[in-house]
Image: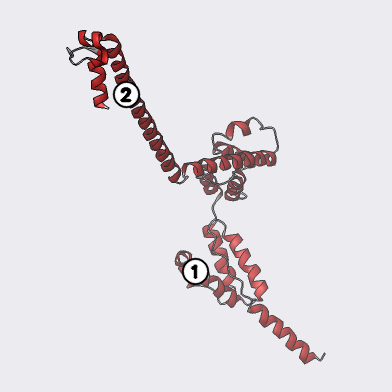
Amino acid sequence: MSSDESDNSKTNVVNSATKINIPYPPFWEEMPDVWFSQMENIFKVKRIKSDEQQYLHTVANLPVSIVASSVDIIQNLPNEGKYETLKNVIIKRKTLTDSQRLEKLLESTEIGDRSPSQFWRDLKSTAGNSALTNDELIKNLWLKRLPDNLRPIIMSRMTDEMSSLIELADKIWQLSAASRTSVCELKTEPNSILENLESEISELKAQIKSLHFQKYQNRNHRSRSRNRSQSFIANKPCYYHFKFGSKATKCKGGKCSFAIIKNIKAEN
């Protein structure tokens, strides 16, 4: 391969690398130094080496609020070292002091829906390398903000390594989360189940009412039949029916048993 072909090949590699579409990360106010490190890694991949290009790419990806607060610097940048100057000023202005980090830790929000391990990492990240904070302080803050069902268990194992405590807290937290999910699913079950139960209860009530009515009718029917039988047994034939039986042509009526039988047959 000739030197010209080799140079062309290298140029093509550089051009293709420059065109690599790698998105820039959103600005990270809590850790601007980490954000600039990410930007510089992308510059390497894209082979963006000139100070001017690095500066322009950086300004284009800064939030409006950061650009607005850095106007005094942007308008007075030196001809050389624009990127490094802007980077150093933003890091200095946005990086928390040790006292600010400690204050933020002490006023930190509750654990919320974060796992204990994630909450621990967030506390460590906020503390950074502050000389005013140490692992023992962060550990106490972490314990105080654990859920009520976790804290007593973890505090009973305080002699364990921190990694073991975090692992145990995560396991209990996961079990609690699964339990809460099951309860929520039970509470949000479709209303159709309740409606079906109500419908079945109504049908049972109707059936019971129908059975009571039939029982009442049967009781009344038996009562009437029994009354008629008792009336027939209690009453005696009149003089004519007693003497002539069914051939009697006269009847005194009233309580004559023959007259009662005749009336019953007539009713039926």
The label shown at residue 221 is: 2
Image: 106 above or below 266: below
The label shown at residue 73 is: 1
Question: SS for tag 1?
Answer: helix
In this rendering, which labeled residue sits more in front, label 2 or label 1? 2
Question: SS for tag 2?
Answer: helix
Question: Residue 208 sits in which quadrant?
Answer: top left
Between 164 and 78, the residue placed more toward the observer is 164
Which kind of residue does numbered mark 1 sit on?
Ile
Which residue is depicted at the point 33% across and 25% down? 216
Between 167 and 243, the residue placed more toward the observer is 243
Look at the image and tell me in which quarter the C terminus lies.
top left
Coordinates of residue 42 in the picture (x, y in percent): 64, 70
Image: 10 above or below 186: below
Image: 220 above or below 174: above
Which kind of residue does numbered mark 2 sit on?
His
Question: Residue 234 sits in which quadrant?
Answer: top left
